[in-house]
Amino acid sequence: MRMSTLFLRTLREDPADAELPGHKLLVRAGYVRRVAPGIYTWLPLGMRVLAKVEAIVREEMDRIGSQEVKFPALLPREPYEVTNRWTEYGENLFRLTDRKDADMLLGPTHEEMFCLTVKDMYSSYKDLPLALYQIQNKYRDEARPRAGILRGREFIMKDSYSFDVDSAGLQKAYDAHREAYIRIFNRLGFEYVIVHADSGAMGGSASEEFLAVSEYGEDTFVRDEHGYAANVEAVEVPQAPAVEVTAGPAHVEDTPNTPTIDTLVAALNERHPRTDGRSWTGADTLKNVIVMLVHPDGTREPLAIGLPGDREVDAKRLEAKVAPAEVEAFEEKDFAAYPMLAKGYIGPGVLGSEKASGIRYLLDPLVGEGSAWVTGADEHGKHVIDLVHGRDFTADGTIQAAELREGDVSPSGNGTLHLARGIEMGHIFQLGTKYAEALGLKVLDENGKLVTVTMGSYGVGVTRAVGVIAEDNLDDSGLIWPRNVSPADVHLVATGKDEEVFVKSEELVNTLEAAGIEVLFDDRRKVSPGVKFKDAELIGVPTIVIVGKGLADGVVEIKDRRSGERREVALDALLAEVQREIADHDDAR
């Protein structure tokens, strides 16, 4: 690769639309270019990094005996109609019609295609177990594409699927994929954690996510001191234990101008002080939040959620529990349709399927039976005190919806929860028979009986991996690629105007490339050394070789991009030095 002819244009200023440090540098260094929100062009340097990430994924998938296929990205509607995902995907699905008005889609994921292809070719238990994978473009019409290639509308994913005759075979395939993923992410080099996850619309039993630990992550996960880790959507908070009722009869009090928890607590402490000597807090109040569920078929259903007033509803936890429905705010027009709801003063008195509103009412498990609360009295300016769950009100059920907090008791029963943020890099599911049953994927077992094939699904975000590595490997000057995914092993910079510098640089490049070493050669003659050095720092190849003034003394300079260490080496020792650096990296792996 010669910089004089390489399709590359580096930028000195951050692009206006880039948010994260790594994203800014990927654009500035000429790896990707934005086409539209969530859609990017991959340029030559970016393609080299992407190819190396793909190679790592392929090697580890091949290692467990999975076989590569490739399905089209443009797909017919019918299989997705059979599994109901044409509807369930809602607005996230890119839909289009062909010239004959047939409905088509751009594939968001390919369970249906894998399932139907195996059905077409295999019919006996003797054909199984089987594992297939592809590395393919996926399309999801994200409402809020952000963070560059970390959350795009077009992206590359490795998705693989296992096919077995029973749950024992599925478990074996799941374990094999789990170990392959550990090797993949260890090789890619970023910090990650494996967490229990919610299966969501994918269905199935077991589900785990591989999250790259990152302050820029959109996923919140929790872990405790004893190894428990889970995505917040998958955390099952234990039901608060029932307690003996000690509160006196519930009583309604005037609490004017108290539509929020803070104003309510202040009014309670001023006008209705507690008799036990402590002050009222938000934790003593019961907040009743109403949202609107929009189901895939377009129907709208209000849902009321009761939780302690010092907690907020966690949108992601709630969305996971009501999927495939989407959650929207309960707006003024919705309140108008339910005049019995006193906004800011809603209580359990009107909530519930059998109550005046008819609105389904679910309580967070933090609300235990026998506990007493201050909550809305369903009349503006009034609250009820000492309303006891189980004595004075009940609900239609429970829902895991309250936000989790640092220091909460771990669901494992040991230790406390610690919150962190991460980027989803891989997700593995034990799908079971959901898709095989819907699409009729059956085989004859050893007794000649038709049985439904049981499946596993396993995904890796390939383009996302490039973004995660970039965010994890940078400094103020630019990117710093790990050697195994770098676009080159060596960035050789020829400086000055002396013809001998360029002649000798050509010889060194030829020597390195003959030894199998990838070189990015800055052979530009009308560019100043300062610009070349800045570009080398920005592009981030791990070893920078500078050919210039030292040539008269028979030496060149080697700079380690990560440590910044510089040293001079003799011309005839350069190959050995670079080979040693590459070997040291391989040994470290």
Image (tube, grey):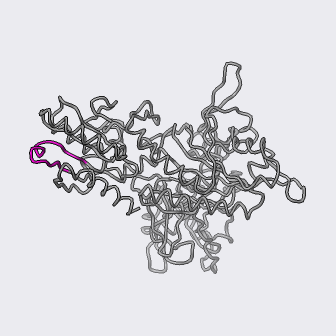
For the N terminus, the quadrant is top left
Question: Left or right: where does residue 246 sit relative to residue 186?
Answer: right
Residue positioned 49% across, 65% down in the render: 222
Residue positioned 69% across, 44% down in the render: 114
Is 508 inside the magenta-drawn segment? Answer: no
> Total of numbered circles in the picture?
0
Residue positioned 73% across, 38% down in the render: 79
Residue 543 can be seen in this image? yes
Image coordinates for residue 243, horizontal then vertical, percent = 62, 79
Question: Left or right: where does residue 125 sit relative to residue 491?
Answer: right
Above or below, 305 against 50 in this view is below
Q: Residue furthest right?
A: 448
Question: Left or right: where does residue 44 sit relative to residue 332?
Answer: left
Range shown magenta: 544-557
**Residue closest to the eye, 46 or 104:** 46
Image coordinates for residue 455, horizontal then vertical, percent = 71, 54
Is 553 inside the magenta-drawn segment? Answer: yes
